[in-house]
């Protein structure tokens, strides 16, 4: 007896968006079905992996996370090159931690110098991620857009409080924006509407739904991302048909389980593999929820996720 697998007919589609140098034709999105349902629709562009690079040396990373980057610690240019040349990152995520007003509070001018150096050093798309301070990011990312005209940056987080300032600069200098909202489908849609009304083309918008780490709210994250995909593919909601980006490493490695040493938590097992597995399981979960870009920290996580993507292709 022949068993026919029931199939869903999708009337919507996730937009395919170009990132970085147009000549390289790197796209994300284009999904024609729910994540990895290859028997129901096409997936012309595999999910992409970005690796996280800080503009200063982190002071709170777990020892197992520091080890792969000890030789480039504090040098974002060398760090970015290593991620591309040794670990095969599809993209670089430059975190402007030093601009945080509650930290070093470096100026937008200082940040732009670092951004330009990193952009010149690598030939992959560059994500420029601010400190998440709405006012400071508005100034820093606006100046970055202007100073890096022609570099086709991906800038974020763009939030309701600064979308006009950053969005206008992204339109003028042709950069892509990361629309970030708290974990809520309606807020995600509303920010996309606001950006569209401002004039930001759909081809220059990514959705950052905000993510939780494994054991720290990932269930709710998954649920919201799933609803975004359902609205985009089944309900044809054009304002939610954007590719999604998830900042995985930041969430996974800030958990106490990833940071605790073997002496402090022997019951949790080997700390060298514990954090990697927490990051990898978080990343896998978000891929199944519909993530098109994952920002990761540890090279071993990158290896595990690449193998997973090959198996699921």
Image: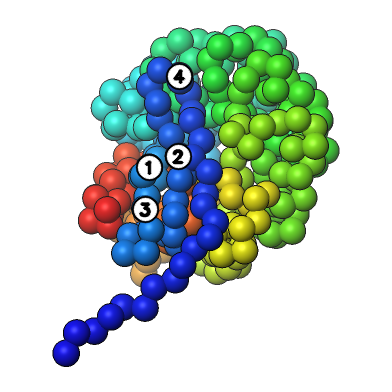
Q: Earlier in the sequence, mark 2 or mark 3?
A: 2
**How many angstroms separate mark 3 from mark 1 (CA)?**
9 Å
The vertical placement of 155 against 144, above or below, is below
Q: Earlier in the sequence, mark 1 or mark 4?
A: 4
| Residue visible at 65% across and 9% down in the picture | 147
- The answer to whether the residue labelled 2 contacts the one labelled 1, judged by CB atoms less than 8 Å apart, is yes
**How many angstroms separate mark 2 from mark 3 (CA)?**
13 Å
Q: Nearer the viewer, mark 2 or mark 3?
A: 3
Residue 311 can be seen, yes or no: yes
| Residue visible at 28% across and 57% down in the picture | 312
Q: Nearer the viewer, mark 4 or mark 3?
A: 3
Q: Which residue is mark 4?
A: 21
Q: Secondary structure at mark 4?
A: loop
Q: Which residue is mark 1?
A: 45
Q: Which residue is mark 2?
A: 28
Which image quarter: residue 207? top right
Q: Earlier in the sequence, mark 4 or mark 3?
A: 4
Q: Earlier in the sequence, mark 2 or mark 4?
A: 4
Residue 42: mark: 3
**How many angstroms separate mark 2 from mark 4 (CA)?**
13 Å
**How many angstroms separate mark 2 from mark 1 (CA)?**
6 Å
């Amino acid at each position: 007896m022949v068993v026919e697998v029931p199939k869903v007919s999708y009337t919507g589609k996730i937009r395919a968006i170009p990132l970085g140098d147009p000549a390289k034709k790197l796209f994300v999105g284009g999904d024609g079905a729910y994540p990895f349902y290859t028997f129901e629709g096409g997936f012309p562009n595999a999910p992409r992996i970005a690796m996280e690079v800080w503009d200063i040396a982190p002071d709170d990373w777990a020892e197992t996370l520091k080890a792969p980057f000890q030789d480039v610690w504090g040098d974002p240019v060398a760090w970015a090159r290593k991620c591309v040349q040794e670990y095969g990152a599809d993209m670089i995520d430059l975190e402007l931690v030093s601009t945080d007003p509650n930290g070093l509070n470096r100026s937008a001018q200082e940040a732009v110098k670092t951004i330009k150096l990193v952009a010149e050093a690598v030939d992959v798309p560059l994500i420029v991620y601010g400190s998440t301070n709405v006012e400071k990011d508005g100034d820093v990312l606006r100046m970055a857009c202007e100073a890096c005209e022609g570099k086709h940056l991906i800038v974020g987080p763009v939030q309701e409080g600064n979308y006009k300032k950053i969005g206008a600069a992204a339109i003028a200098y042709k950069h892509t924006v990361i629309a970030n909202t708290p974990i809520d489908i309606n807020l995600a849609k509303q920010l996309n509407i606001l950006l569209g009304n401002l004039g930001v083309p759909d081809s220059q918008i990514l959705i950052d739904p905000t993510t939780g780490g494994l054991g720290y709210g990932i269930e709710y994250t998954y649920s919201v991302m799933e609803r975004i995909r359902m609205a985009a593919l089944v309900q044809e909601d054009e304002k939610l048909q954007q590719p999604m980006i998830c900042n995985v490493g930041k969430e996974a490695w800030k958990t106490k389980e990833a940071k605790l040493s073997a002496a402090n938590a022997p019951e949790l097992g080997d700390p060298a593999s514990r954090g990697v597995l927490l990051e990898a399981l978080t990343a896998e979960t978000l891929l199944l929820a519909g993530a098109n870009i994952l920002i990761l920290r540890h090279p071993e996580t990158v290896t595990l996720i690449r193998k997973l993507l090959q198996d699921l292709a």
